[in-house]
Amino acid sequence: MNDLLHYLFSNQNLGIKLGLERTYALMERCGNPQDHLHCVQVAGTNGKGSTSAILAKILQEAGYKVGLSTSPHLVDVNERIRINGVSIPTSVIEEFVETFQPDIEEIGSSFFEILTALGFWYFVKENVDIAILETGLGGRLDSVSVCNPFVVLMTSISFDHTDILGDTLEKIAFEKAGAFKSGVPCVSVHQEPKVEAVLKNQAELKNVAISFTNIDSLTDVDIGIRGEHQKQNASLAIQALHHLPFQMKEFHILNGLQKVIWYGRFQIIRQSPLIIFDVAHNSSGIASFLKEWKSFTVTGKKVMIISLQYKKDITNVIIDLQQHFDEIICTEASGGKPMNVNQLMSYFPMTEHLKMIKNPDDAIRSALETLSENDSLVILGSHYLGPAVNNIFELSFHTM
């Protein structure tokens, strides 16, 4: 890693910095690209990345030049910023950091704030027709919320980052609704009643026209990302099109839905033995994963490797996980704030067929050695399992 990229990653040590003051300050030094960018903002808890990828692919199929900003990445930071599915070149990241390093240091910008500004600057520099911007954390104090979108999309809201966003669904929904902007419509998936009430209240206070999706029309539509819950995300993406000033044919939508790729979301790496990679990292995400998993018929042994980030609570899906896997291997993916593997082990009351292999690469290799043709392996949980999956299976996540 060269000095400029090393400098960029060193800003991760500053941790999460909530608030928009530093982002606005850095944007100003970059020429305020947020004021020159046509965009859609995607907020929520689960499904933000999938919804963003689906919408970006539909627009790309219609011939538009589409920027896509998501987080976190699986292997390389370049994956967070794409144009027409292709990751930003390292040389462009270096150019940005070298140009604005004095400003970054003076402002005290965090890693995420730098990447947000980089994405906006790159999309304007490359003259994209539209950018799809995934909100990182919350909405009210998230850097992405400095954008001026055509529409705000709200995916399913559930418990996550409770230490930052609040310990009730109402508090979390309030923070997510902070992405609302006066006069800018919001389209949301159907939420739990208490969440929906908060969104409607905040929409009224902020002069936001809010509507909710209907997935009935997607019953027989093929979507490139597996999972019943992806119909909800696809419906949200399709509803967004009504708020964009672009021409769209039905076959553009169908082609986009069929061709979309979003790595680490029920991603089938091999068929025999069946190997699946899914970054479901909280209770709601794991529940959605299990719903799709139950539709598979595996005649042989079912093995799961799991790693989570610190403070993730999956207590209410543990029994279901144990019922659907014959062997569970707990591991500890480096990066971020990983949950200690001993703590992860303590979630599981069963002791038989429960293993600890701290290194994810070793965990995957060990599991592969035991698999026969009819067996299966699921690699589940943290995005930080991406490097191990990349190393073992020699996958690239750069082009979608």
Image (cartoon, rainbow, N blue to C red):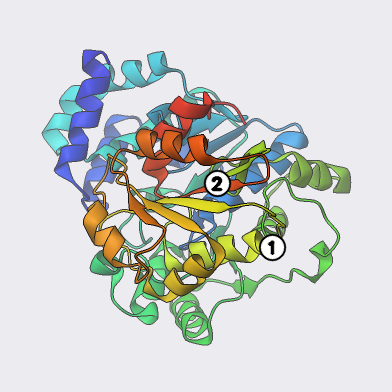
Which residue is identified by label 1? 228
Residue 44 % position (x, y):
47, 63
Label 1 vs label 2, nearer the camera: 2
Residue 279 % position (x, y):
47, 50
Residue under the point 52% across and 59% down: 326
Q: Residues within 10 Å of mark 2 (few under 14, many from 20)?
A: many
Kind of residue at badge 2? Leu
Residue 68 % position (x, y):
54, 38
Q: Relative to 245, is 385 on the left or the right? A: left
Which residue is identified by label 2? 377
**Mark 2, secondary structure of its residue:** strand
Residue under the point 47% across and 67% down: 322
What mark, if any, has residue 20 been given in the picture? none
Kind of residue at badge 1? Glu
Q: How many badges with numbers are in the image? A: 2
Residues 351 and 21: in front is 351
Residue 35 lies in quadrant? top left
Residues 74 and 32: in front is 74
Q: Is residue 92 visible?
A: yes
Q: Is residue 315 above or below residue 265?
A: below
Residue 364 lies in quadrant? top left
**Mark 1, secondary structure of its residue:** loop
Q: Earlier in the sequence, mark 1 or mark 2?
A: 1
Q: Residues within 10 Å of mark 1 (few under 14, many from 20)?
A: some
Q: Relative to 113, is 381 on the left or the right? A: right
Residue under the point 66% across and 47% down: 54
Residues 100 and 254: in front is 254
Residue furthest to the left: 106
Residue 259 % position (x, y):
75, 39
Residue under the point 51% across and 71% down: 320
